[in-house]
Amino acid sequence: MARNIISFAGAGRVAGALCMEFYRTGIKIQKIVSEFEDDGRSLANSCNASWSSELKFPDTTDIIIVAVPDHKLKELLGDIECHESAVVAHTAGSYGLEVFPDRLKRTGVLYPLQTFSKERKVVFSDLPFFIEASDKDSSDILKKLVESIGGKVHFVDTEHRKMLHLAAVFVCNFINHMLMAGNEVALRAGFSLEVLKPLIAETISKAIDNGPVRSQTGPAIRNDFNTIEKHMELLSFSPELQKIYREITQSIIKHYKNELMNG
């Protein structure tokens, strides 16, 4: 069975990870288009593709994956030139098919629910991808593309995908910010984040295995106001961390009070 020829608009973290994974499985990468030449040429050279700053794609490109920051997406899609048969798909979680110009007839969303960093290799096996497309044929093409790298396909409309993107902000971006705060406090005790690694690992593992509602521990769920006040005093060096601690503590207390009342 013939494999699709892919090009990319974008050369950042998401584009780089997807591009190299498709290339690793034997899919031909034809062209990388990016605003910044160094990043674009580097990615193109690593997958035996060409680079350009112009959003004009060869007629032989079957799929164009657009992986750029959300605020650039609509303008960039409006500038794409490609064959009418090409499937153009973006990777954003917060946008749907509405961002594509009418002249692009075969469009889709290919949203990988993962965080990407240039210095880390992502495991794509069973990684959830959320797909939406303008037509069944385009949907099938994107499905087969994801399955070629071992990804797990889910068909989701725009509104539900937006909610999943929001969920991802809570469990990824907000958790990372909490880790940053924890590291800042630990450093005041003379330790780095390393000493907290076993606790972090067990917290995440337990929440996945037992569910987060059943896994909550700490002074807030115990209504241990004496400890809470001591923590607030210790955080006197940072009014911002005090505010975060207070609001999250109040949220936990309120949640489990309601759980008890409704239980």
Image: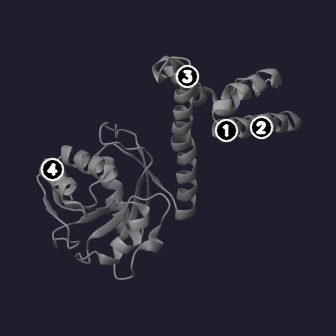
Residue 119, position as x, y percentages in the image: 30, 37
Q: Residue at x 56, y 42 (%)?
A: 174
Q: Which mark is residue 188?
A: 3
CA–CA distance between discs 4 and 1?
Answer: 49 Å
Type of amino acid under label 1: Pro
Q: Quadrant of the N terminus?
A: bottom left
In-image side of 51 versus 34 (left or right): left
Given residues 21 and 77, the one toward you in this image is 77
CA–CA distance between discs 3 and 4?
Answer: 45 Å
Element class at badge 1: helix
CA–CA distance between discs 2 and 1?
Answer: 16 Å
In the picture as drawn, the residue positioned furthest to the front comes out as 237
Type of amino acid under label 2: Gln
Q: Residue at x 57, y 52 (%)?
A: 166
CA–CA distance between discs 3 and 2?
Answer: 25 Å
Element class at badge 3: helix
Q: Quadrant of residue 54?
A: bottom left
110 w.r.t. 106: above or below = above
Element class at badge 4: loop
Q: Which residue is mark 4?
A: 47
In the picture as drawn, the residue positioned furthest to the bottom comes out as 103
Q: Earlier in the sequence, mark 1 or mark 3?
A: 3
Q: Nearer the viewer, mark 3 or mark 2?
A: 3
Q: Which residue is mark 1?
A: 239
Q: Quadrant of residue 162?
A: bottom right
Q: Earlier in the sequence, mark 3 or mark 4?
A: 4
Residue 105, position as x, y percentages in the image: 35, 78
Residue 47, position as x, y percentages in the image: 15, 50
Q: Which residue is mark 2?
A: 250
151 w.r.t. 197: above or below = below
175 w.r.t. 210: above or below = below
